Image (cartoon, rainbow, N blue to C red):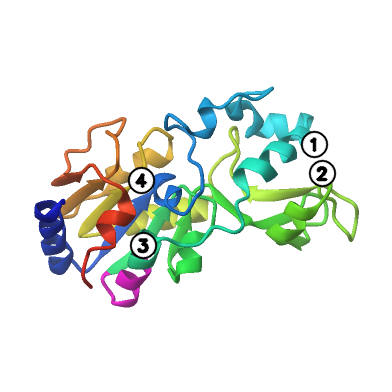
Amino acid sequence: MYEKEIGQLQAMVDESNRIVFFGGAGVSTESGIPDFRSADGIYHQQYKYSPEEVVSHSFFMRHTEAFYEFYKEKMMVLDARPNAAHLKLAELEAAGKLTAVVTQNIDGLHQAAGSRNVYELHGGILRNYCMDCHAFYDAEMVKKSEGVPRCTKCGGIVKPDVVLYEEGLDSRVTDGAVRSIGAADMLIIGGTSLVVYPAAGFIDYFQGKYLVVINKSETARSVCADLTIAAPIGEILGRVQV
């Protein structure tokens, strides 16, 4: 299945030397991490507060304990492992074919697979900092803490290094992502519905030769792709030869 499309994808990969991958939640669902917007995603489940409200800066500040109750249960999946998509992207980078991964995900699975040049647009759950003294804490400390995690040095609230609604993206990360996409000769968009902005707008900086979309469902915006494959990202990328 998908032999024709994979053949086309392979030919594009073989011809390209500055590939950039732009991905979203669908990349990690094959590792058992729930997404937000699919039919059975987090946004369609019932909570006391809407997920959009919970993962906002104002909610974090006003209802920190309720935030962490949701965050630890639904967003901190620490036993997840990289899948075929993560591993293939790391392999392409090691072979000198892929220059960067730009991800909307916060799970750290690209780095766990071996990818080195990763731009995490929305931050990552593996990094956590005291809001007062800026001491660093790992994800295990946050996950195992009772209620709101507190700094062992000063007692301040520990906040995950993730970009919540109402917060701006890190300019150093966005600059690097934009430069990488702008210099790419091939852009692969995978596992994202292109709903979340400003991240979804980054693909407009692509001026290269091949634009590929690999996603199980249609994207929210038309991107005039040279190749579109409606399938799970790991299933397709896993069959690309390096």
Going from N to C along the chain, the mark reached first, 1 or 3, is 1
Contact, CB < 8 Å: mark 1 with mark 2? Answer: yes
Q: Residue 191 carries which label?
A: 4
Residue lying at 17% horizontally and 43% vertically, measured from the top left: 225
Any mark on residue 158, and which? none
Q: How far apart are marks 3 and 4 (CA)?
A: 13 Å
- The tag earlier along the polypeptide, 3 or 4, is 3
Q: In this view, does 192 lie above or below 3?
A: above
The disc label shown at residue 148, or none: 2
Q: Which residues fall within the magenta stretch? A: 89-97
**Amino acid of disc 4:** Gly
The Cα–Cα distance between marks 1 and 3, rounded to whole angstroms, is 36 Å
Secondary structure under the numbered disc 2 in the rendered image:
loop
Q: How crowded is mark 4: few (under 14 residues within 10 Å), some or many (20 or more)?
A: many
Residue wearing tag 3: 84
Q: What residue type is disc 3 on? A: Ala
* Residue identifier under label 1: 65
Q: Which of marks 1 and 2 is nearer the N terminus?
A: 1
Cα gap from disc 2 to disc 3, whole angstroms: 35 Å
Q: What residue type is labelled 1?
A: Glu
